[in-house]
Image: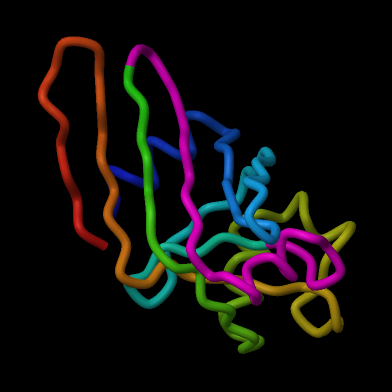
Amino acid sequence: MQEILDFLHECKTYYLATDDNGQPRVRPFGTAEEFEGKLYIQTGKKKDVYRQLLENPKAEICAFSKGTWLRIAGELIPDDRVEAKKDMLDKNPSLRGMYDENDDNTIVLYFKDAKAVFYSFGGEPKVVEL
């Protein structure tokens, strides 16, 4: 898990792909943290990405840095607990201007049944089960 987090933090921006009624949608994200041994991301409940994940929780992340890229595929499961949201916001204080763990908008989601794969040009893929 730490290797995945370190890579995502180094990249600063990763891309999250979701399904919107059969149309792939990809957008930049920046939050990725570990909470209770799971990989979490954060968004707002009012955003299309959240609606898309409720309709189809299958998602994929792709990030690239220094000739290596990481793909994480699995299901993103909402966790509406204040403790999980607070942990994410405490680790990403720049979000506090837009989100609060007690508002009706902030949501964190964790990867379930996920597989992370590190790739590099010419190298063998490295698989990490989450």
**Horizontal arrangement in the rendering, residue 126 relative to residue 67 (left or right):** left
Q: Nearer the viewer, residue 61 or 8?
A: 61
What segment carries the magenta color? 43-67
Q: Quadrant of residue 103?
A: bottom right
**Above/below status of 127 relative to 121:** below
Q: How many marks?
A: 0
What residue is shown at x 83% (from left), y 66% (from top)? 99
What residue is shown at x 63% (from left), y 46% (from top)? 24
Q: Position of residue 90 (x, y in %)?
A: 64, 64
Q: Nearer the viewer, residue 14 or 32?
A: 14
**Above/below status of 24 relative to 58:** above
Q: Position of residue 127 (x, y in %)?
A: 17, 44
Residue 29: within the magenta? no
Q: Quadrant of residue 112?
A: bottom left
What residue is shown at x 65% (from left), y 41% (from top)? 26
In the rendered image, the quadrant that contains the C terminus is: bottom left
